Amino acid sequence: MRRESYNRAALRVAQELAAPEARIDIAEIGAIPLYDDDLREVEWPEPAALLCKQIAEADAVLIVSPEYNYSVPGVLKNAIDWVSRWPDQPFAGKPVGIIGASPGRLGTARMQYHLRQCFVFLDAAVLNRPEVMIAGAANLFQDGKLTDETTKGMIEKMVQALVAAARKQGEAS
């Protein structure tokens, strides 16, 4: 959510490296209220409904997230909890790619594995490869820009794999 986060910078790189026919839009999740089934039964909060519609309309989803306390950040898990209750599950069968950047040595590995578990229930088609876990991010980003070419290449491969999975999914339906 931070404007100057390594993950937001990695997302900007993914946007820049996307194929001309691909577009990566950013879905903001900070305004989604804490999941409350009583609230959902009365009326869907607009930020949660908007996220569900964005996912439903997308050919694929790319999640770029840090790791908090060895797991998925609460705001991301909360957003997924809201989406999980949408009447026509927008993640079902949808290709999902995951990228994470961290100053630590494991580069969001624990968060990514926990996030994958959430998507089993939602029947999403999470890409197994490539895995993009950007470790030591403080040494790879300067002034909000990714300076490491190897890491740029990893992000580019993820974007290409996600586009290919979306095309394959589109041909199958």
Image (cartoon, helix red, strand yellow):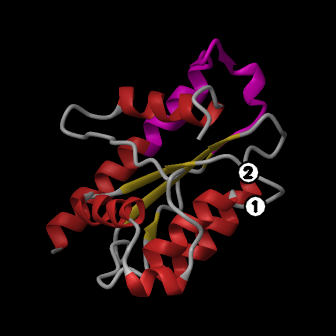
Name the side, left or right, on which 114 lies relative to 173: right
Residue ID at (62%, 58%): 75
Give the labeled residue for mark 1.
Answer: 71
Contact? badges 2 and 1 (CB < 8 Å):
yes
Question: Where on the picture, by quarter, is residue 96?
Answer: bottom left
Identify whether 5 is placed above or below 147.
below
Residue stretch rendered in magenta on the structure: 133-158
Task: Say which amino acid is labelled 1.
Answer: Ser
- Distance from the alpha carbon under mark 2 to that under mark 1: 5 Å
Residue ID at (26%, 58%): 59
Identify whether 17 is placed above or below 160.
above
Image location (x, y in percent) of residue 170: 18, 65
Q: Dot 1, how many residues are within 10 Å of its Cα: few (below 14), some (14-19), or many (20+)?
A: some
Q: Element at badge 1?
A: loop
Task: Say which amino acid is labelled 2.
Answer: Glu
Image location (x, y in percent) of residue 80: 52, 69
Question: Where on the picture, by quarter, is residue 109?
Answer: bottom right
Q: Dot 2, how many residues are within 10 Å of its Cα: few (below 14), some (14-19), or many (20+)?
A: many
Q: How many marks?
A: 2
Q: Element at badge 2?
A: loop
Q: Nearer the viewer, residue 92 or 19?
A: 92
Give the labeled residue for mark 2.
Answer: 67
